[in-house]
Amino acid sequence: MSLHKPSVWQVIRPHLAVFDGALSLIIFLILCVGIVTLYSAGIGLPGRVEDQLRNILIAFIVMWIAANISPQTLLRFAVPLYMLGVSLLVAVALFGVVKKGARRWINFGMVVQPSEMMKIAMPLMLAWYFQKCEGMLRWHVYLVALLLLALPAALIIRQPDLGTALLVLAAGVYVIFLAGLSWKAIVAAVIAVGASLPVIWNFLHDYQRQRIMMLIDPTSDPLGKGFHIIQSTIAVGSGGLTGKGWLKGTQAHLEFIPERTTDFIFAVFSEEFGMVGNVVLMTLYLLLVIRGLMIAANAPTLFTRLLAGSITMIFFTYAFVNMGMVSGILPVVGVPLPFMSYGGTALVTLGLGAGILMSIQRHRKLVQT
Amino acid sequence: MTEFKDIERELRLFRRRLFAVSALVLLCFGLLLSRFIWLQMVRYEAYAAKAEDNRISVVPIAPNRGLILDRNGVVLARNYSAYTLEITPSKIQVPLDELIDQLGTVVDIQLKDRRRFKKLLEESKQFESLPVRTRLTDDEVARFTAQRYRFPGVDIQARLFRQYPFGKTAAHAIGYIGRISQSDADKIDNTDDAANYNGTDYIGKAGLEKSYESQLHGTTGYEEVEITASGRAVRTLSHTPSVPGKNLILSIDIELQKVIEEAFGDRKGALIAIEPSTGDILAYVSMPSFDPNSFVDGIDQQSWDELNNSPDRPLVNRPLSGTYPPGSTYKPFMALGALELGKRRPEDAIVDHGFFMLGNHKFRDDKPDGHGIVNMFKSIVVSCDTYYYQLANDMGVDAIHDFMKPFGFGQLTGIDLENERRGLLPSTAWKHAAYSKPEQQKWYAGETISLGIGQGYNSFTPLQMAHALATLVNNGIVMKPHLVKLLEDGLTHQRTMIVPKESYRIPLKQENIDFVKSAMVGVNRPGGTGAAAFAGAGYVAGGKSGTAQVATIKQNEKYDAKHVAENLRDNALFTAFAPADHPTIALAVIVENGGWGASAAAPIARKALDYYLLKKRPGEVTKADAAKVDAVTVDPVTGNTSD
C-alpha cells in the first residue's frame, strides 16, 4: 500500500480541504454569472474576459494562501499591517502620485494604492483591539476604536476617494457595532452626526455643495455625471421582467453605459437578464452573506467573530452600494460589484476576505477546546 | 464559572448583533427589490421607450430638387455635387476669426468668403453647420482631411448645389434658391410641410424657384439607424427613399430669351412674349439682370448692397412689378372699343390741326401741324393723338374702363410668379375710393382726354400689355399667361400638363378685331411708325409703337430729349404680333428712358420676331436691314412718325 504511487487527486485533496464548500460554491456561481456578463459587456473591448480569468486565478491563489493562515497568525499581523497602512497613507498624502485629480497612489517602482489594503487591515486592527480589551469593554475603549477608524478614513477622504473611504469606514463601524456598542451610544452618535450636517454644510464652498447635490440628484447634470446614472437607470428599467437576452442589451452595446465592464456591469446584467436575473443574483449575494454570518456566529474567539462578521458585511456593502448606485437610489461612488466587476485589485481583496472567512471556519474547533 | 458566563453573555450579545445586521441586509435588499419592481415592472414601458429613443436615430434624406428646363428641354437650373468646408459655430474652441485665419492656411479662403460667412452666421442658429468655402478642389479636400484633427467643429461635407448655367439670362423668371433663413424656418414651421424640410438647407427665394417651391422640393426620405452614445451609426434599420422634386418644363424659349437680352444691351426695360393661343410665355425679359448663382451659397453683404442700391435696379422684376403708362400702344384697344361700342365707324374721319381743345385747355399732338384728315386706320398707322383725345372724350372714362378691364389692363393676370402688381386702370369709382377729399374724388373731364393716348392715370405692367395684345390677336379668347407648361416626374419622367384652359372669352365682333389687326399690320408697312424697324421682314407682323412721358411737360413747352436728364426721358414702347393671319407670338417691349418707341423699342421686337419665326439671329440680319434701323435711331426727332 505504501508503495502505491498516490493519484493526482490524493495529492491535491488535502490542500483543497482548506476551502469551505458552501462559500466556494456560492462564489463560484457568482463568478460564473460575472464572466458570462463580462463576455457581453466586453464586446468591443478585446481581452477583458481573458484578463478577468487571470485575475480570478490570482484571487484564487490569494484566497488559498489566506485560508491556510491560522487566525492566531492573523492576530499577530493585525497591528503591523495597520501601522504599515497608515504610514503608507501618510506617505501618499506627502509624496503621492496625482491621477485624474486625486492623490491615491504611491510609486515604489510599482504604483500601489494603500487605501485598498485598509479595507482588510481596518477590521483586522479593530478586531484585534477589541480582542485585547475583551471583558472590559468600557466607553473609552469604543472611543479609542473610533479614533483608530477615523485616522485612516480621514486620510482617504482627503485624497479624495469617497468610495474607498466609505468601505473602510463601514468595515470599522461593523466591527464596533458587532463588538456591542450600546444602542444608546449609537442613537446619540446618529443624532450628533445628523445635527452637525447643517453646520458642516455652511462651511462648504459652493462648488463642494454643488458636487454633493449632484450625488444626491444626478438629473441636475444630465449631460455630465448625471448622464451615467440616467443611462444606467434606463438600462435597468428597459430590461423588464426577463431582460432583453444575453448579448442583446442595446444600452450596453451602443455604449450608453459608462464603465460597463467595471462599476456599472450590473446595468449590463440587469438589462440583459431583467428582474428574474436580478432576483437570482441577489439571492446568491444573500446566500453569501448568510454563509459568512454563520461562520461568524460559530467563530471561537471575539477576534474571529468580529473579523468574520465585518468581512461578510463588507461583501454585502459592496453589493448593495453598487446595485443601489446603478439603479439610481444611491449616489455614484466608485464601488465594484463583488466577484462580477472587471478588475484585479478588487478581486484580490475579495479573495483575501473570503480566504480569511474560510480559515476562521476551518479553525473554529481547534481553538475552542 | 463566571468566565464561562461572561463568554455566554458575550456570545448572546454578538448573536443579537448578528440578527440586527441580518435585518439591515434584508431591509437593504428589500429596498433594492422594490426599486427593481418599480423600474422593471411598473415603469418598464417608459424605460423601454427611452432605450429605443436612445438607440434609434432618424436621419432625413433630403430629396433632389427638381430641375428647371426650357420648352425645348434645355436645362436652366440643375444640381451638382461638391465638397464644402463647414463650420459649426457652437462646436468651435477658438474665436471664429482666428479659426478662419488658421483654416486659410490650409484651404484658400477669400475675403468674399468671409463676408458671406458673416452674413450666413447672422441668419442662422449656432448649432447649424455653415459653409465657409464651397466647391473645394480635390487637392483642398485632401489637405484639410489630413489636418482635420486641428480643427474641432470644422468638417467637409458633400452637398448638392444649385446651378443656373445661363447665369443672368431669364434670372427674374427662374429666380434662385438660398439658405433657409430664420424667417423662412418660422414660416415652414407653421405649415404641414415642416417635417419635409428636415435635412433641407435651401429654399426657393425668388421667381419660379419660389412659386413652385412645393413641387420642386420633393419628399424627404428617412433612414432609421441604430446609433451609439457618441452618435456613430452602427447599422440601418429601415430606409424610406426620398422622392425627387418635379422638374419644371417652362414655356420659355431660352434661345429667344438670349437673343432679346442681347438686343437690349445695356438698356433698361422689359419684354414679354406670349404665344396667344396658349398663354405660354415665350420670353420673360427684365433688364438689367443679375446672376442668380451668386445667391445660392449666400451672397456677401457688399455684393448684395451693390445689386440692391444700383440706380439701374437689377433686382426689380420689371415685367411683373414695373408699372408704366402704355402710351400709344393703347390706341388699338381704344379703336377696338370705339368700334364695339359704336362710337366710331372705321371710315369716320377727323381733321387734325395738331391739337384738341377741351374748354380752353389745349391737348397737343406730337406733330405740331397735325396729320390732316385722319380716319381710324390712319390714326393707328401714324399714331395720331388728336383722334384719340376726341375719342376718349366721346367714350368717357367709365366706358373705357369697362371695355379695357376684360383685357386684363390694371388686373392681376394670375401668372405663376409671386408679387405681381396690379397697376391702375382708372375709373370714376376708383378715383372716388382712392382719395379722401371731395374735390380730389371728383373725376374731371380733362382727365379723360389723355387716357385715350395711354397716358394720365393709366399704369400697367409689361406683362399686362403683352397679355392684352395676345388676347386681342387671339380674337378675345383669354388665356392665362404662365411660365410653367409641364411638370415632369423626376423618376418616371411622366409629364403632366398644367397649362390652364381658356379663362373666358371677350364678346367681340370678328370684323372689328380683323380691322384693328390690319391697322396694326399697317403700322409696320411704309408710312407707318414701325416701317423702318420692320423693313424687309420675311413675315407679316402687326405692331404699335408708343412713347410714354415720364416727366410732365408744360402746356406750350416742347419736349427735347437733349435737355432732359436721362432718367426723365420718355419710355419707349412697342407691341407686336406675327404672323398677322395666324399669330404665334405677341409681345410687348418697353425700354426705360429709351426715347421714341419706334426707334428704341421696335428694333428689339423685330429681332425677337426674326429669331422666333425665322430662327434668324441678329448677327445674320442683313446689312441693309441694319442700316435702315440705324438711320431711324440717329434721327428720332425729325421723323414724320409721331408716336
Image (spheres, rainbow, N blue to C red):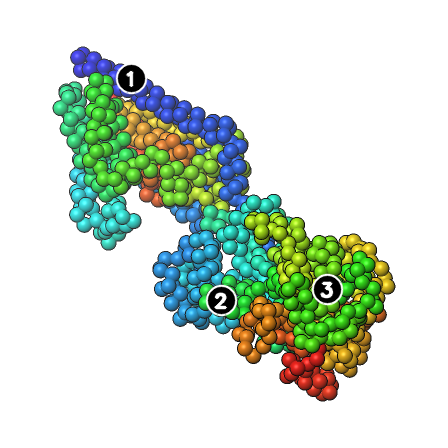
**Label 2 and label 1 in one chain:** yes
On residue B347, the disc is none
Chain identifier of the residue bearing label 3 in the image: B
Q: Is residue B233 left or right of residue B22?
A: right
At a point 22% along the width and 22% down the height, the residue shown is A191
Does residue B484 appear in this view?
Answer: no
- Could you say whether the residue bearing mark 2 is in a helix, strand or loop? helix
Q: Going from the N terminus, do you reach mark 1 or mark 3 first?
A: 1
Does residue A167 appear in this view?
Answer: yes
* Residue B305 percent across, percent down from the top left: 47, 66
| In this rendering, the label closer to the viewer, 1 or 3 | 3
- Could you say whether the residue bearing mark 1 is in a helix, strand or loop? helix
On residue B309, the disc is 2
Where is A337 relative to B263, above or below? above
| In this rendering, the label closer to the viewer, 3 or 2 | 3
Residue that mark 1 sits on = B16
Residue that mark 3 sits on = B390
Q: Residues within 10 Å of mark 1 (few under 14, many from 20)?
A: some
* Residue B194 percent across, percent down from the top left: 58, 47
Chain identifier of the residue bearing label 2 in the image: B
Report, in whole angstroms, how far the alpha carbon at label 3 lies from the one at label 2. 43 Å
At a point 46% along the width and 47% down the height, the residue shown is B229
Q: Amino acid at mark 1?
A: Arg
